[in-house]
Image (tube, rainbow, N blue to C red):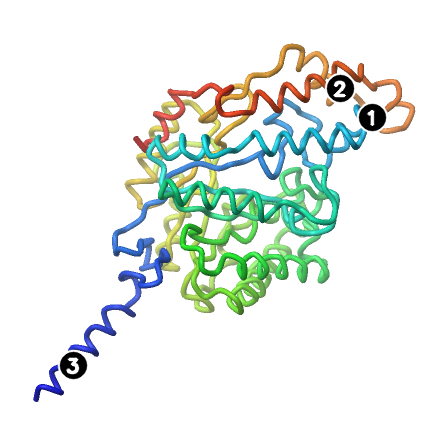
Amino acid sequence: MKKAIVYLAVLLCAACTTRGGDKDANGFVTIQGHDLIKPNGEKLLIQGTNLGNWLNPEGYMFGFGRTNSPWMIDLMTKEAVGPDFTAEFWQQFKDNYVTKDDIDFIAKQGANTIRLPFNYKLFTDEDYMGQTGQKDGYQRIDSVVNWCKANNLYLILDMHDCPGGQTGDNIDDGHGYPWLFESEKSQELFCKIWQQIAYRYSKETTILGYELMNEPIAHYFTNRDSLYTLLQPLYKKAVQAIRQVDKNHIILLGGAHWNSFFWMLDDASYDDKLMYTCHRYGGPATKEAITHYINFRDSINRPMYMGEFGHNTMEWQRDFVRVLKDNNIGYTFWPYKKVDNSCMMAIKRPEGWDSIVVKYSETSRNTYQEWREARPDQAQFRQMLKQFAENCRFENCTPQKDYIQSMGMQ
C-alpha cells in the first residue's frame, strides 16, 4: 500500500510539471491558450518598447525622408565622407545608441519586455554598418541580454531585415520587392541564420522568443495574394530548423500586409510554442478596430501581441493601451529613441543638421556628376555625424514624459 501511495504521488507530481501552461521547470516563458506564462506560473502580459534604429537604421529616425533604408543611409554617408569615416561613425553610433543606462531606464518605467530589431547582415560577410567579415551581431545581442537579465526584463529577437527582403519597402533594407519568397538561396540563409541564433541562445531564459520576420509582404504588388500563400510554408521551414537545436523558446509569427493579415497562417499544429504578432499605426483606438486580430487569436487559440504601435497623440496611445489590456494583448511601443519626439527618449539634432546633413540626404545623387556637385563640406559633415553619435548617448537625450505616461506601464 505504501509503495502504491508513493507511486501515485510521483505520477501526480509529474503531471503537475508537464501540463501545458503550468510552471516551466527550465525557466522559460510558456504558452497556455491565449496567455503567456512565466516560469513561476504567473501570467505575463508583454509591456515595453522597441530598440528600433540601433541595429537596423531607418531614415526618418535621423530626420531623413528620401534616404530611408539602411543601405541608402550608408551609401549617402560614404558618398559624403568616404567609407573609412562612415565605418567610424557606425561604430560610435552603435556604441552610444543603446547602453546599459538605456535598458535600466526602460525597466524603471515599468516595462517587462524589450523587442530588439536586427538586420540579418549582422551574421553574414556582407558589408553592413561599417563592417565586413567578422561582425559584432552576437556581441550586441549578448550585451542586451545581460542588461535585460540585470533588470528582470524579457527580450524578443526580431529579424527586421531578412535575406532578399521580406517586405518590399525600405524597412527590410532590400530592393523594393519581397525577393525572399522567390529565392531558395535566400530562404536557406534565412533558416540557417535563425538556426545559428537559436543554437547560441537555446538555454538563455532572458530571451522570451524569436520573431522570425518583420512585416512580411507589403500590399503594393499585383501578385501579393500568391505571395501571401508562401508565408506559412517558409515559417514552417524556419521553425523546423530552429527546433533542431532549440525546443525551449517561443517563436513569434507576424502576419502579411504590415503584420495585419493572418488568414494565411491557419495552421498552428506543427509547433506548440507559436504565438502571433500584429502591428497598428493610426485608426480608431477601439476594440472594434482590432476585432480581426482578436478573432484570429481566438480561432487559433494562441497569444496575440502588438509588436509595434505609436507615433500618435498621447490620448490615442493611452486609449489604445487600455483596449489592448482589456483584450489580453501585450504590446511594445515603437520606438524607444529617435530624433525629436514621439518616443521615450528624444535625440537632439546637432546645430546645422537639417541645413547640411538632411539637405544632402534629399539631394539627387543618381550619377557620379551629381555626387561630386552635391558633396558637402567634409569637415562640417564629419562634425555633424560625430555630434549626432554623441547626442545619441542616454545622458544627452531628453525623456518624453507625456509619451512615457501614455504607455500605461507605470
Query: Disc 1 or 2, which lies upstream in sequence?
Result: 2
Q: Nearer the viewer, residue 103 or 334?
A: 103
Q: Considering the numbered disc 1 on the image, is that residue within a helix, a strand or a loop?
A: loop
Q: Which mark is residue 360?
A: 2
Q: Which residue is denoted by mark 1 in the rendering?
A: 365
Q: Is residue 221 above or below residue 94?
A: below
Query: Disc 2 or 3, which lies upstream in sequence?
Result: 3
Q: Amino acid at mark 1?
A: Arg
Q: Is residue 175 above or below residue 75?
A: below
Of discs 2 and 3, which sits in the foreground? 3
Q: Is residue 330 visible?
A: no
Residue 77 point in image, percent of width and height: 75, 27
Q: Is residue 22 visible?
A: yes
Q: Nearer the viewer, residue 209 or 100?
A: 100
Residue 97 point in image, percent of width and height: 56, 30
Q: Amino acid at mark 2?
A: Tyr
Q: Which mark is residue 8?
A: 3
Q: Residue at x 67, y 46 (%)?
A: 135
Q: Residue at x 66, y 37 (%)?
A: 170
Q: Amino acid at mark 3?
A: Leu
Residue 62: which quarter of the image? top right
Query: Do residues under tags 1 and 3 come within 8 Å of each other at their CB atoms?
Result: no
Q: Residue furthest right?
A: 369
Q: Residue at x 60, y 61 (%)?
A: 234
Q: Residue at x 14, y 81 (%)?
A: 6
Q: Is residue 145 above or below residue 272?
A: above
Q: Which mark is residue 177?
A: none
Query: Disc 1 or 3, which lies upstream in sequence?
Result: 3
